[in-house]
Amino acid sequence: MDLLIQILISGFILGAIYALAAAGMTIIFGISGILNLAHGGIIVLAALVAWYTSQHLGLGTYLGDLVGIIASIVVTYLLYVLVILPLERFRHISTAEKHVFQLVATLLVALILQGVLEWFFGATPVATPPMLEGVVQIAGNNVPKNSLLIGVVAWVVLIGLWFFTSYTRLGKAMLAASMSPKGLAIVGYDIRKVHVMVWGIYGLLAGVAGVLLASFVGASADVAINLTAISFTIVVLGGLGNVFGSLVGAYILGFLSTITAFLISPSISQIPGLVLLVVILYLRPQGLFGRH
Amino acid sequence: MSNVNRSPQTTGPWSRDWLDWRVVLTVLFFVFLAFTPLFAGGYYLGVLTIALYMGVYAMNWDLLFGYIGEVNFGPTFLIGLGAYGAGLCNTYLGWSVWACIPVGVVAAMIGGLLLAGPALRLTGPYFGLVTLVAVLILSQLIVTFAGYTGGEIGLALRDILTLSSKGNFYYALGLTVITALALRLIVRSPLGLILEAVGQDAGATEALGFSVTKYKVFAFLVSSFFSGLAGAMTVFYFGTASPGTVVAVVMAVQVIIATIVGGRRTIIGSVFGAIFLIVAGELLRPIGQLSNTVVAVLALLVLLLAPGGFTSLFGSRKERKA
């Protein structure tokens, strides 16, 4: 029973962080068609900056987390302005190949980010101190308050995202941009402004995922590529561009890897998810909730 | 068919005339390489040997990406199968080098067929993800069965190709020239045109009566044949097979970057890209930890400023835009 509860709680929190991480990636894909392979690098950047500013610059956990999130947004905009925009301007490359260029370019950015982060922060995994001390008893199990807070924060941000896209003017514009950019332009929206806003939201989501990850399990530069692979898997599993699908995919993957880690061995916790992904892609190439 | 931007039969002397100056330059470059052992020391030959093997990997990636348009994130799946197929054969069966290399090639070709399956069903990022997963699973298997494969540390082989750095260099150069000629012949033949058509519009190609399945499988088999061969020869060059040198995702990324930087859909550009990547990495080694990062920055600059790669700098105006 204890094991079951531990799996449920760990899986719940890990799934929420995965969902946050994947939400940004899938939104960017839905709106600008870009699969950002530097994704894990940006998440780890937020985690490491939060750790560094809170531990070494003495800003404290909360302020450090804030700086981490800001760093993530800044780097996201740098990526957008220095790499994505110039690539969009290539007129003489076909659309199909442009996607590959975006993939390769963001992959290079991932390598650069990982190299710089490792050079600056070192390769040892680090964790930020807990935001809340103490434990609570859940059905006879000691659960750190911090872990619960992480799960709650992740869910609040996810619900906020849902509220934003469903009930606010800007959010609806964002959703419309993923469905019909032309239609959005016709009703008078500047599509470029929507893109700029979406990249900001992307940076915010990746940043929050990063600081939560740093607090829950810790982070180091070399997990960046794994985080990209996990997010990529979730996004494809749920259907590219579908936020709800990503949420479901994140929980499937979160629980699968938690169960494997608890019951078999943490070292192969990623494998069942990968196998499941291949099976699902064979049966439903568009993902669980893909549109076509 | 919006992206048919170049048909080899109509544009540029590169395609029509074998005495084009770029062909001459390429041949001169390889002749120059063939004479490097006369003046270069063992260290430089070692670097060039690695670069040439990387060039062979990259040429085969270009065949899949540049021609049939498959985004294969797992070139090291095929290379690794060739490498470990040959390595395990040598270590456990005790067969000679030249008996084990075909074993590696067969292992890689079986892997090629395994990848061709999803390639027929999935497109774009979905297929890319499956290939990435293939690499992750392969490296996980190698680590899980460390008792047989040597795990992260690597599998020590009984034999090597040769002890001489000149000999090794000529093996690598020979393989590079043979692969380059074979792949150029394929892509320049009518068969190559069909492969390109498959990559640009599979539906239209099928409608013209060509079996997309057959041509895709063919391309995967050719690519995995040479990838496996190169992987097998690489482990017999190093004397060990380890995930870090023939399977890791980082290696796969290097192969992809070599092709993009050298110039996609040219086959030969991949060799230049690979030599650039490896030599730049070596030259920058003194700056330490950041050397790979600087190489990545350079590659990104090439990608942004000359998206057609190095070879496009020598192309005609039209090709430069392609």
Image: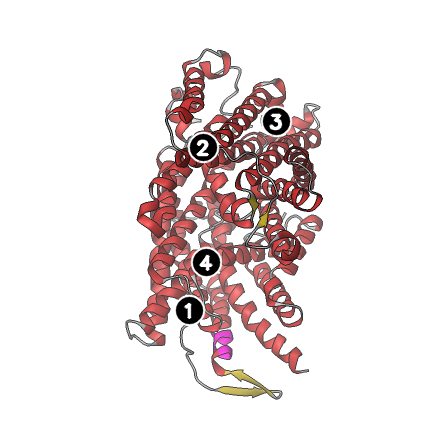
The answer for which chain carries disc 3 is B
Question: Which one is closest to the eye, mark 3 or mark 4?
Answer: 4
Q: Please tell me which residue is depicted at 66% across the width and 60% down the height of the picture.
A: A272
The answer for which chain carries disc 4 is A
Q: Please tell me which residue is depicted at 58% across the width and 26% down the height of the picture.
A: B196
Crowd class of label 4 (few under 14; some 14 to 19; many from 20; radius 10 Å): many
A159 left or right of B300?
A: right
Crowd class of label 3 (few under 14; some 14 to 19; many from 20; radius 10 Å): many
Position of the N terminus of chain A, as image quadrant, is: bottom right
Range shown magenta: A147-153
How many angstroms separate mark 3 from mark 4 (CA)? 38 Å
Query: Disc 3, disc 4: CB below 8 Å?
Result: no
Which disc number belongs to residue A222? 4
B40 left or right of B67?
A: left
Q: Please provide percent x and percent y for residue A202.
A: 43, 58
Q: Are marks 2 and 1 on the same chain?
A: yes
Question: Which one is closest to the eye, mark 4 or mark 2?
Answer: 4
How many angstroms separate mark 3 from mark 2 (CA)? 19 Å
| Amino acid identity at mark 4 | Asp
Q: Are marks 4 and 1 on the same chain?
A: yes
How many angstroms separate mark 2 from mark 1 (CA)? 42 Å
Query: Disc 2, disc 1: CB below 8 Å?
Result: no
Residue A44 against residue A107 in the figure, above or below: below
Q: Which is nearer the N-term, disc 4 or disc 2?
A: 2
Q: Please provide percent x and percent y for residue A127.
A: 42, 71
Which disc number belongs to residue A93? 2
The answer for which chain carries disc 1 is A
Q: Which residue is tagged 1? A: A126
Q: Please provide percent x and percent y for residue B45.
A: 43, 33
Q: Which residue is tagged 3? A: B195
